[in-house]
Image: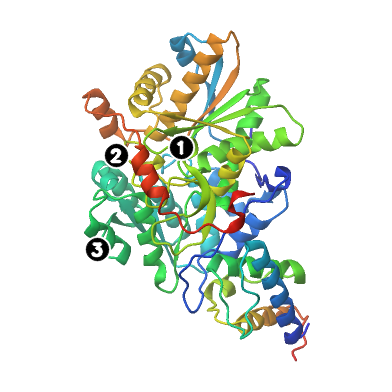
Amino acid sequence: MTEVPDAWYNPLPDLGFALPPDLPPPRRGPRLELNVPAALVRQEMSRRRWLPIPDEVRRRYGQWRPTPLRRAHEFERMLGTRCRIYCKYEGGNLSGSHKLNTAVAQAYYYRRAGAARLTVGTGAGQWGTAVAAACAMFGLGCRVYMVRSSYLDKPYRRTIMELLGAAVVPSPSAETESGRRAAGGAAEPGGSLSIALAEAVEAAAEPGVHFCAGSGETYSLLHQTVIGLEARAQLEDLGDPPDVLVASLGGGSNLGGLALPFLGAMLRGGRPVRCVSVEPTACPKLTRGRYAYDFTEASGRGPLQKMYTLGHGFAPPAIHAGGLRYHGTAKLISALYHRRLIEAVAHPQRAVFETAVAFAAAEGVLPAPESAHAVHGAAVEARRADAEGRSCCILVGVSGHGLLDLAAYQAYRDDTMLDATASDERIAEALAGLPEQPPEADTA
Amino acid sequence: MTDDELRKLILGLLERQQTVNGAEAGPPADGDLDLTSLELVRLLVNLEDHLDLELDDVDIMNANFGTIDDIVALVSRSLSLAGRVGRA
């Protein structure tokens, strides 16, 4: 029987290359106060393959982990495939998604470092809900800047966060310079994750208040490896190791959490496995973005990271998978993609929802719109294998439930959902706003 | 380890960190810090490695760093608590 892992997996010792260093932003203040607990940076810089999970975090994990891994027999039958499809389901907690895995760890370390309150930016609301839940566990205050379009579309996300004691602010707001600037420009009245993050950064200026970065930082990906570690053990118990892993890509923590333990085993000489990242055609950062140094949010106050990006000023067309509307990709995932250790595909949202509805009817699980991209990607992989006369084992990461995303499913049912594809012009315009690149930016 | 030795170690680590980052400037001659928050944490974690010491996360989070001497003071205090420092 699989147990909650007692250590997070750190792939850095197995990669055989170092991640490109972050670069300082052009704007700096006169004195420095720290926003990140040193414990998290120690993890990110560690050369140890296994990082022990603190007892208090592991005890919290035990409230919903290990998460179920189940073969999707009915979905396979519906597709008429010879492939075996397994789902690793991360929706069975209060936040409804995988985000709680790192939120709990981060809140623990922030509290240990003396923080009193955390500020966060959230797109679809999953990260905001997860941090609100984690703050409630560890007695921290929480202020969430939620992308305005999601704030309006998903009122019950707000309800959960407020029940947990968090303050929820629609972004762009009038509270911060970044919010006022964005609202004044009105280029993106519904907001974007990049703007919400910028507001959360600004709001962390008071003593004891810290910005909690979210899911793209390397330490977040390390925390998420509990997903892949459990899945490896569960499939090992079943004697059916995967040939293909499929996960959706927002910032990269879901994909990384599922894939890194399998990729690490492969890099250590283990069984080969393909890893497929699924993104929306509205926000195609791996398939159409550029590998370059960019800001992680719109304020330009944080360090520059080397990533696949559409430009920090990119405003994706409105789609229902708000968590996938982020301009950039975690630097670890970007480096893996740059070295062709993972693959990437993009799908339009109507096809994604069509598959998700069928999956819900077949398997009794309504995937979050983000997770629906992975489910659709898995169906595409199965059909391709069938067409090529192959049978294979597919592991799909169902990162969250869609029970708070019913407005999206209603739009699909009402036939008011539109496919959205980022235009070449919009991408080119945003990429033109990339910061000046260092001379060595083409390497690494 | 004396404060002077600590100062030299910090300058050496800063130089190496800036070389890795491709920065043009060398270590600050006037002792002022010109680092991002994350760079500063990285410097502190590098110092921990070199000194085989773990700084207190609360001390780090509550500190306000403007100069190299601010870091020297923090590390020196931690070494002192561990019974490993002779100030100079």
Separation of residues labelled 3 and 1 (CA atoms): 34 Å
Q: CA distance from mark 2 to mark 3?
A: 22 Å
| Chain to which mark 3 belongs | A
Structural crowding at the residue carrying mark 2, measured as other residues with C-alpha within 10 Å and reported as few (<14), some (14–19) or many (≥20) = some
Tell me the kind of residue under disc 1: Arg
The picture places residue B61, in percent across and down from the top left corner, at 54, 71
In the image, residue A81 lies at what x, y percent? 51, 10
Q: Secondary structure at mark 1?
A: helix
- Is the residue at mark 3 from the same chain as the one at mark 1? yes
- Do we see residue A383 in this rendering? yes
**Label 2, label 1: how many angstroms apart (C-alpha)?**
18 Å
Q: Residue at x 51, y 61 (%)?
A: A303
The residue pinned by badge 3 equals: A174
The reply to whether label 2 and label 1 mark residues of one chain is yes
Mark 1 — on which chain does it sit? A
User: Which chain is mark 2 on?
Assistant: A
Crowding at dot 3, Cα within 10 Å, few <14 / some 14-19 / many 20+, comes out as: some
Amino acid carrying label 3: it is: Ala
**B37 to the left or right of B80:** left
Q: Which mark is residue A318?
A: 2
Residue at x-position 69% and y-position 55%: A46
- Residue A202: give x, y in percent of width and height: 38, 66
Residue tagged 1: A288
| Pointer 3 or 1: first along the chain | 3
The relative height of residue B52 versus residue A253 in the rendered view (above or below) is below
Query: Which three-letter amino acid code belongs to the residue tagged 2?
Result: Ala
